[in-house]
Image: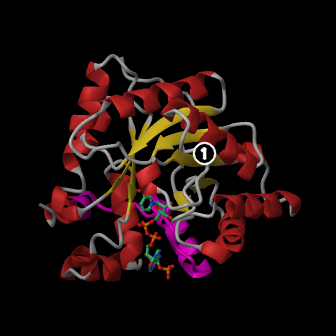
């Protein structure tokens, strides 16, 4: 059975990776600009989750948003994906590490639950392992205890998800993957997600697809639709069912990225961009 996820999901996610000392200010700015969904991770190597919490707190204090207006997403990251700043005891079992990581996220974000808790990546790129099964079961328990509403999996293949499902476990509500045009914009995974009621979140839509951004087709569409090339890419993502992430650090780009949601591409443009891919 596909998982039921009754909550409306957001239309754009603001990504908080790689912002270090600017994390709080940029998170607050994203909320002031209109983002209502925030993606982070309890992985200090690439994210500063406590500072995301500071940005949220500043926005709450200023009356910009309340917790109830927001969709907050964080991740559990295995030890090899972390540096020395761990959100759990490395000697603890994986199940305990999951519980400790989420407890620490809830403290960072000053909330009693997140909206989505994501496995940052499976233990092996080749298949779903016993470690993943243990972690996924621990994440399910966190969900059932109300500390997250939904579960997600990132940096994952259809093969992993088939193996996860074959073991009788519940599929995620979200998949979050880097989306390359040359893989047909992750066509195989997007199809699997459609068939299984999973929302596909795409990251690196701009940075992984420079060849598309610089294609003449994008220049022509940009001129024809009076939109920037990144806006065309985000509007295209929306048209093919991708929930996009942006981690922009610029106020102007935040506004443009959100405005791209109002841009509806003609069908021929969607097909043309899709056909640029592999
Ligand atoms: N699950 C994972 O393993 C994973 C991995 C990577 C990322 N993520 C998530 O995804 C988020 C986004 O990461 P990303 O890899 O997609 O890269 P990104 O941080 O969004 O970077 C995108 C680049 O595009 C530029 N950009 C954004 N909007 C633009 C616009 N309207 N016009 C021109 N340039 C624009 C940004 O430059 P400016 O700052 O100058 O606008 C930036 O250089 C991360 O913050 C993180 O939350 C997850």
Is 243 on the left-hand or right-hand side of 11? Answer: left
Q: Is residue 257 magenta?
A: yes
Q: Is residue 193 above or below residue 3?
A: below
Which residue lies most toward the front here?
A: 91
Tell whether 171 sits left or right of 142: left
Q: Quadrant of ligand 1?
A: bottom left
Q: Who is closer to the viewer here, 90 or 226? A: 90
Residue pictured at 63% horizontal, 46% vertical: 71
Q: Quadrant of residue 149?
A: top right
Spot occupied by residue 128 in the image (x, y as percentages of width and height): 28, 34
Give the class, few, some or many, for how many residues have Cα within 10 Å of label 1's Cα (few <14, many ≥20): many
| 124 displayed left or right of 92 | left
Residue 57 appears in the picture as rendered = yes
Q: Is residue 87 above or below residue 269?
A: above
Residue 147 location (% of width, % of height): 66, 32
Local secondary structure at mark 1 = loop
Foreground pick, 27 / 273: 27
Residue 5 in sight: no
Quarter residue 233 falls in: bottom left
The quadrant in which the C terminus is found is bottom left
Please name the residue shown 33% across and 61% down the image. 236
Residue matched to label 1: 88
Magenta residues, start to end: 243-270
Residue drawn at (66%, 63%) of the image: 34
Place of residue 108 in the rendered image (x, y in percent of width and height, measured from the top left): 72, 52
| Residue 51 found in image quarter | bottom right
User: What colour scheme governs how the chains and residues are painted in the rendered image of this protein?
Assistant: secondary structure
Question: Which quarter shows the N terminus?
Answer: top left
In percent of width and height, residue 206 lies at 36, 71
Q: Is residue 149 above or below residue 265?
A: above
Identify the residue at image location x=34%, y=79%.
Answer: 222
Magenta span includes 60: no
């Amino acid at each position: 059975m596909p998982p039921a996820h009754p909550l409306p999901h957001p239309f754009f996610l603001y990504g908080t990776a790689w912002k270090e000392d600017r994390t709080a200010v940029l998170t607050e700015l994203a909320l002031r600009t209109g983002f209502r969904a925030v993606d982070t991770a309890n992985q200090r190597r690439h994210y500063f989750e406590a500072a995301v919490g500071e940005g949220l707190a500043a926005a709450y204090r200023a009356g910009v948003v309340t917790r109830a207006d927001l969709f907050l997403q964080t991740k559990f990251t295995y030890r090899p994906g972390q540096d020395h700043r761990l959100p759990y005891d490395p000697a603890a079992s994986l199940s305990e590490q999951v519980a400790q990581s989420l407890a620490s996220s809830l403290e960072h974000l000053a909330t009693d639950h997140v909206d989505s808790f994501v496995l940052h990546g499976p233990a092996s790129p080749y298949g779903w392992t016993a470690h993943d099964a243990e972690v996924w079961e621990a994440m399910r328990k966190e969900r059932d205890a109300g500390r997250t509403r939904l579960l997600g999996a990132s940096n994952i293949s259809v093969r992993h998800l088939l193996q996860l499902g074959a073991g009788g476990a519940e599929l995620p509500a979200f998949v979050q993957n880097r989306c390359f045009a040359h893989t047909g914009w992750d066509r195989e995974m997007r199809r699997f997600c459609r068939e299984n009621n999973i929302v596909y979140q795409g990251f690196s839509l701009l940075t992984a697809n420079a060849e598309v951004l610089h294609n003449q087709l994008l220049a022509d569409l940009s001129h024809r639709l009076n939109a920037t090339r990144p806006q065309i890419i985000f509007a295209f993502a929306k048209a093919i069912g991708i929930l996009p992430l942006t981690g922009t650090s610029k106020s102007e780009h935040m506004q443009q990225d959100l405005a791209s949601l109002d841009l509806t591409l003609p069908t021929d443009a969607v097909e043309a961009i899709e056909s640029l891919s592999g």
